[in-house]
Image (spheres, rainbow, N blue to C red):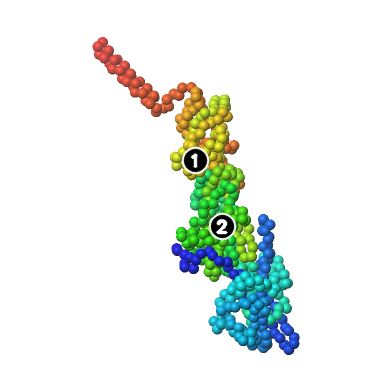
Amino acid sequence: MKQLGKWKRLFAGIIASAMVLTTGVSAMADTKVETGSITIENAVKDTTNTDGTKNEYNYSLYRVFDFEGSTVSANGNYSNGVYKLSSKWAGKNFKSGYFTVNADGTLKFAESFNTEDAAKFAKEAIEYAKNNGISPDLTKADATSRKNVNDKTEKIVFNALPLGYYLVDSSVGAALALDTTAKDVVIREKNEVPTLDKKVKDDAGNWGDTNDSGIGKTVEFRVTIHAKKGAEKYVLHDNMSKGLSFNGISKIDIIGKNGDTIGVMEGDDLKKALDASLKLNPSDEDTFDLDCKQTCLDFISDDVDIVVYYSAVVNEEALIAPDENTNDARLEYGDGHFTEWDQTKTYVYAFDLHKFAEGKENLADARFALISENGVSVNLIKKDDNNYRVAKAGEAGAVTDFVTNENGMINISGLDAGEYALKELEAPSGYNKLDKPVKVVIKRKNEKADGKYLVIENDQEKPDHKVDIENLTGAVLPSTGGMGTTMFYIVGGFLIVCAFVTFIVRRNTVD
């Protein structure tokens, strides 16, 4: 399904902090100034990730308009007052299409200024404040808080607030909802922090936490960002170990709550977006950072999944199992908050070939080819006399055969799991060449992500990952069914027939 028009916009621009307009209202009765309060329930607690990074969530209040004069109703709420632009904002020449300033300094709001417009005005105002050096009137440090023991939330209360029209800025980035008519306003924080899920595709096409691969092969990754309404400043950080070379992002899907695909970004649209938002080898030492820009995030009106597909190629620096080649991803969001790193592991394998004669004498100068499951010789790079590795696609110097050294040993690394055949092309001088290939199977020892694996030679498990191949000396007799045996049967049969005919002729003569 092609992406909707709103998702075809580029990932460009920075999202304004997600907030909600609030009126922390109070009244003036004679010379006594009454105050109100704003309580934020379900506020997100500060957390510390396992890598030591801290997520300290802040809530800030901006008083944009001062409130003057009021009538107290029976229920303690206030009306009939007027608003004026607060001195901080007036000093920075703040203007908006949602209000005009009368000659007496009072404000006239646009007739269409409704709840939806109020949310837009909140973003506009907070962005203006941050870009023009208008500091918040109060922050979380000025509030009292009480942590909820059984969950990850707390209650934050701002007391003794002068009357006014407030914006509440959440560093988490999701919109808050509240009733703006009461003296003591209670905000129910509806925000949930975003989460991230990282997977790698295995040979069967399933997505999981581990996979097997070999040098030169492509590994596919999928990151799912569980984005929240009011998403702010999302940056995907990805860090690959040295054995993986980033190969690019192929597609980005937007999935709704019901599992339907809302939008797809690929092809030219994706290329344009990545040109503006993808940073390779950034200063934070990641492999890449993908900045989910405002023009995308602004359209998130409900919780959605942002699914990013990308790949890497296993290179010559790949670690050999049980060591793993890792790919870590995490999401940065809001004002410098991070999810935990989520990691996938890619395993690459190796085995030893030991060529020997009767009595375990090591044999040099045996020439072999390694054949893959599809019957093609595996291209290899000679590292030294003892070691070969799988070649990358098109790599110069690649060979399709190798020769054992004086120790009779060769290590072959960079292999994917699977079935192979060792075909002897030439035996050492004075020894007989193998009449058929040796089957070698590489597979995981168990389903645990511990990197342990098995090498099986002709259905015999080799716990030391060493394939032992013996060469014999002496004449090679024809095997059953070979040409030598066939000729023996034909000649032998002819001689028997001749003897029988001679016997009959002689008997007739005697008779």
Q: Tell me if I can see residue 207 in this picture.
A: no
- Residue 279 placement: quadrant: bottom right
* Kind of element beneath mark 1: loop
Q: Is residue 328 above or below residue 421?
A: below
Instruction: Tell me which residue sits at (55%, 25%) in the image.
Output: 358
For marks 1 and 2, give the CA distance: 30 Å
At label 1, the amino acid type is: Ala
- Up the image or down, 113 lies above or below 254; here it is below
Q: Position of residue 4 (x, y in %)?
A: 47, 67
Q: Are marks 1 and 2 in contact (CB under 8 Å)?
A: no
Using the image, determine if residue 212 lies above or below residue 165: above
Q: Is residue 289 visible in the rendered structure shown here? A: yes
Q: Residues within 10 Å of mark 1 (few under 14, many from 20)?
A: few
Q: Which residue corresponds to the image point at 67% horizontal and 72% vertical from the top-left?
A: 135
- Picture quarter with the C terminus: top left
Decide which of 396, 90 is in the foreground and name it: 90
Mark before the other along the chain sequence, 1 or 2: 2
**Horizontal and vertical percent for residue 43?**
66, 69
Q: Residue 286: x and y, percent?
A: 60, 54
Q: Which element carries disc 2, helix, strand or loop?
A: strand
Quadrant (top left, top right, bottom left, bottom right) of the N terminus: bottom left
Q: Amino acid at mark 2?
A: Lys
- The residue nearer to you, when weighing 476 against 236, is 236
Residue at which label 2 appears: 279
Give the percent coordinates (x, y) of residue 130: 63, 70
103 and 307: which is toward the camera: 103
Q: Is residue 268 left or right of residue 197?
A: left
Question: Residue 396 — which label?
Answer: 1
Instruction: Identify the residue at image location x=59%, y=74%.
Output: 124
